[in-house]
Image (tube, rainbow, N blue to C red):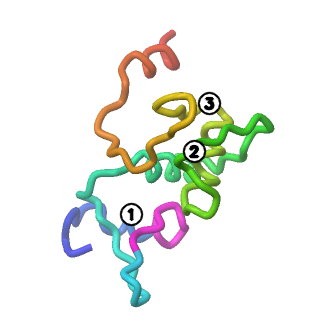
Amino acid sequence: MNGFLPWAEETLYDLVDTDIVKGYDDGEGTVTVRPNAPITRAELTSLLVRVLDLKAAENTKTFTDVPKGKWFYNDVNTAASLGIVSGINATQFAPNFITLILRHRTLKKKWSH
């Protein structure tokens, strides 16, 4: 991890060891973690599904830009079937968009008392 976040290094290694964080395979058998890199919608969705050990609901939702065979296919469809994520429109998820902000309106609606 090259000292990016020394205080979090042990936790990040634990997350990789438990397959919650998959990391980036360099093609030579080494997996790296990039804690300072932006996170995509697909990556964030996959983390949520793995951390919460979610299983898909019966009402599946598919997106044209989330094809079968992509590493995030099952996680995105699981989260969408449970209403945890939605697309940027009716047919697209935008898996490679960088997640920069959480929409205040959505959070307020889901967790307001």
| Residue 11 falls left or right of residue 9 | right
Q: Is residue 57 above or below residue 69?
A: above
For the point 20% across and 66% down, the residue is: 4
Foreground residue among 59 and 7: 59
Of label 3 and label 2, which has the lower sequence position? 2
Helix, strand or loop at label 1? It is: helix
Asked if the stretch drawn in magenta spans residue 17, the answer is yes
Identify the mark at residue 83; answer none if there is no mark: 3
Looking at the image, which residue is at 72% across and 47% down?
55
What residue lies at 80% left-to-right and 38% top-to-bottom?
58
The numbered dot on residue 11 is: 1
Rendered view: 17 above or below 53: below
Q: Which residues are magenta?
A: 15-24
Q: Earlier in the sequence, mark 1 or mark 3?
A: 1
Q: Mark 2 belongs to which amino acid?
A: Thr
| Residue 3 located left or right of residue 14 | left
Q: What amino acid is found at the position of numbered circle 1 in the picture?
A: Thr
**For this view, does 77 lie left or right of residue 32?**
right
Query: Gap between marks 1 and 2, in whole Å?
Result: 35 Å
Furthest-bottom residue in view?
28
Give the quarter of the figure containing the N terminus: bottom left
Q: Nearer the viewer, mark 1 or mark 2?
A: 2
